[in-house]
Image (cartoon, helix red, strand yellow):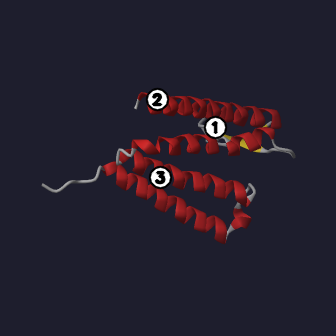
Amino acid sequence: MVKRTPPTVGIGFLILLVAGGMSLLVHLHPEKLKVPAWVAHLALGLLAFAGVCVVALALRLNQLIWLVCVLLGAMAIAPAWIALGSGPRQCTMFSLGARGARAAVSEVACRDAFGIGATILATLFILAVRGALWSRDAG
């Protein structure tokens, strides 16, 4: 009988390919970005890292659970930068109303929204570290 890899492995590799392709586009056309290039590359690097985590977990490489902890901690960087970084922030909001229009959002609302996101990710990071420590102690 042939051992088959879980379909989730393919999804992880697809995530890696998408992140790589998008990173190439960012590199070729940084002038089209509305954020510093490092923010876009960070986000795409995290997307690629998420693909690695998906593959590792699909292959039941449970000893690599720390990868997920690192991913969650790193994911909090971009929203924390938007929420707490110096300089003005300008956000737009997409409405699903009748017209599906974009509207500008105040800087305070923008920073608050991203601050909430960073706080949620930091909480998930803490819970993941706690779970990884508990699983290490149990094993």
Image quarter where the C terminus lies is: top left
Which one is closest to the eye, mark 2 or mark 1?
A: 2
Image coordinates for residue 71, horizontal then vertical, percent: 57, 45
Q: Nearer the viewer, residue 67 or 34?
A: 67
Q: Nearer the viewer, residue 70 or 120?
A: 70
Name which of mark 2 and mark 3 comes first in the sequence: 3
Kindly state the secondary structure of the residue where label 2 is placed.
Answer: helix
Residue 130 appears anywhere in the view: yes
User: Would you place residue 44 above or below residue 137 in this image?
Assistant: below
Residue most extreme to the left = 1
The CA distance from mark 3 to mark 1 is: 30 Å
Residue 102 appears anywhere in the view: no
Q: Which residue is mark 2?
A: 137
Q: Which residue is mark 1?
A: 95
What type is the residue that disc 1 sits on? Ser
The CA distance from mark 2 to mark 1 is: 47 Å
Image coordinates for residue 116, horizontal then vertical, percent: 69, 30
The CA distance from mark 2 to mark 3 is: 27 Å
Name which of mark 3 and mark 1 comes first in the sequence: 3
The quarter of the picture where residue 127 lies is top right
Asked if residue 33 lies left or right of residue 85, the reply is: left
Name which of mark 2 and mark 1 comes first in the sequence: 1
**Mark drawn on residue 27:** none
Q: Which residue is mark 3?
A: 51
Image coordinates for residue 131, horizontal then vertical, percent: 50, 29
The quarter of the picture where residue 82 lies is top right
Kindly state the secondary structure of the residue where label 1 is placed.
Answer: loop
Which one is closest to the eye, mark 2 or mark 3?
A: 2
Asked if residue 38 lies left or right of residue 53, the reply is: right
